[in-house]
């Protein structure tokens, strides 16, 4: 991901203008980056957005109007998709519920709206079968191996909670038959990141599972996990080669089944990560035993990936005074939270990793890139910090798509026992 160390604008709008208009910290999203990523996936029959990456109604509506379908992993995400204008019915299904369990709200909404389900456990098959016999379903299979840039993002193998264990597929097919459920698709997502030797194993596993499921299978899904280069020296994934491997798998299944098989891909991060920026103000510059700290007004309550995974995000300085020296210095970037782990420049395991950044002072802005995926959606109110605003940037114009949470709203729903309130 190429992001200059000194950044003056995002999506054609000056950083200083965004900060003055909306305050900091704030999330800003450049829609042109989403459009560029989406164009690269045009070869797939279906692009199904994994909205868990970023689920604001603005992006869901924008994608829907470009014929992108949506994946939901909770009752709330089902309602978000409906609110954004997705129909519950269609071929292919506009909304698919993918999970390893049904909570009571999710099962109720699935049945009420006839939402297609991608079952990740045998219990989901029986629970849906009892509530909505005769439905069509997809099975998410755990092939016995996984992949990921962190153990916490590995979604395959015996230590992962995700999917139906591959050795249980036959039993699950028989279970579906008992309820009249038609297994029409095979889904496999085994973690983030991708190398093609590993991908060929995934393709082989999907083909094997689909053949076992039988001729009623009309779709296969590549799952998600398409990587983006967070660091400038990381390579881009070869989407053409990625598609070729999956397309060859699909064609072999079509020959075996004697009918068309739809090829779906399920990007989340790949579509939106590079569009998002977390803009934060430097509120203190501290020298601590030979280390320089830039302390900013955003923390892991805004962007949790560094503290969770030691994730790397590109950073830039947007100086208020553009005539000052921008000589580089090693810097540790930390937030305002009462937590030692509230550090943006750390590796996995919590090890501090100073970053070369331009000289800055209080009042300058620090911009964290790659924050469109798993940024706002993982935000919290820890330390009673309000949720940051979200700003949509398109054709050089900014639009507020979520206001900053008011301080009073942090406790508006709380009740003191015995009080007269409420």
Image (tube, grey):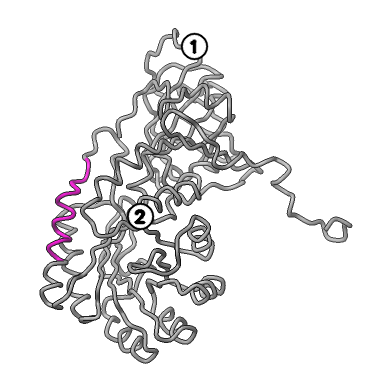
Q: Secondary structure at mark 1?
A: loop
In this picture, residue 16 sits left or right of residue 154: right
- Between marks 2 and 1 in the image, the one whose residue lies nearer the viewer: 2
Q: Residue 68's mark?
A: 2
Question: Real-space Cα distance between discs 2 and 1?
Answer: 42 Å
Residue toward you, 265 or 354: 265
Residue drawn at 82 percent across, 56 percent down: 416
Q: Is residue 357 above or below residue 54?
A: above
Circle 2 crowding by C-alpha within 10 Å: few under 14, some 14–19, many from 20: some
The residue stretch that appears in magenta = 236-249
Q: Position of residue 76 (x, y in %)?
A: 54, 61
Report which residue position mark 1 lands on.
321
Residue toward you, 413 or 400: 400
In this picture, residue 121 sits left or right of residue 40: right
- The dominant secondary structure in magenta is helix
**Sequence-first tag of 2 and 1:** 2
Residue toward you, 285 or 265: 265
Residue 326 quadrant: top left
Q: Position of residue 284 (x, y in %)?
A: 56, 23
Q: For the C terminus, give its image quadrant.
A: bottom right
């Amino acid at each position: 991901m190429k992001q200059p160390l000194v950044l003056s604008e995002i999506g054609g709008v000056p950083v200083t203008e965004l900060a003055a208009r909306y305050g900091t910290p704030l999330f800003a999203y450049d829609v042109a980056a989403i459009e560029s990523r989406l164009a690269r996936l045009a070869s797939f029959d279906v692009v199904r957005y994994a909205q868990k990456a970023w689920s604001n109604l603005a992006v869901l509506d924008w994608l829907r109007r470009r014929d992108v379908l949506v994946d939901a992993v909770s009752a709330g995400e089902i309602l978000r998709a409906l609110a954004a204008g997705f129909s519950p019915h269609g071929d292919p299904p506009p909304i698919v519920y993918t999970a390893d369990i049904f909570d009571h709200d999710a099962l109720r909404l699935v049945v009420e709206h006839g939402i297609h389900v991608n079952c990740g456990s045998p219990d989901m098959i029986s629970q849906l079968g009892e509530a909505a016999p005769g439905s069509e379903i997809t099975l998410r299979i755990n092939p016995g191996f996984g992949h990921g840039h962190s153990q916490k993002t590995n979604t395959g193998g015996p230590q992962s909670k995700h999917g139906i264990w591959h050795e249980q597929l036959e039993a699950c097919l028989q279970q579906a038959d008992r309820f009249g459920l038609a297994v029409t698709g095979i889904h496999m997502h085994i973690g983030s990141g991708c190398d093609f030797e590993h991908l060929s194993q995934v393709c082989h596993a999907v083909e094997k599972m689909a053949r076992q499921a039988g001729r009623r299978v009309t779709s296969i899904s590549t799952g998600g996990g398409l990587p983006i280069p967070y660091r400038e020296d990381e390579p881009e994934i070869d989407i053409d080669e990625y598609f070729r491997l999956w397309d060859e798998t699909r064609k072999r299944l079509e020959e075996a089944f004697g009918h068309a098989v739809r090829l779906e891909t399920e990007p989340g991060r790949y579509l939106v990560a590079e569009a998002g920026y977390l803009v934060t103000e430097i509120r203190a510059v501290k020298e601590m035993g030979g280390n320089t700290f830039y302390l900013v007004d955003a923390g892991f309550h805004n962007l949790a990936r560094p503290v969770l995974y030691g994730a790397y995000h590109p950073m830039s300085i947007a100086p208020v005074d553009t005539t000052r020296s921008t000589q580089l210095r090693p810097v540790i970037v930390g937030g305002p939270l009462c937590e030692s782990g509230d550090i943006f420049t750390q590796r996995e395991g919590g090890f501090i990793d100073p970053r070369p950044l331009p000289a800055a002072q209080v009042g300058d802005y620090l911009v964290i890139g790659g924050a469109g995926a798993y940024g706002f959606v993982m935000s919290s109110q820890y330390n009673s910090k309000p949720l940051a605003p979200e700003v949509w940037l398109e054709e050089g114009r900014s639009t507020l798509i979520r206001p900053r949470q008011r301080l009073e709203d942090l406790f508006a729903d709380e009740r003191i026992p015995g009080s007269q309130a409420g």
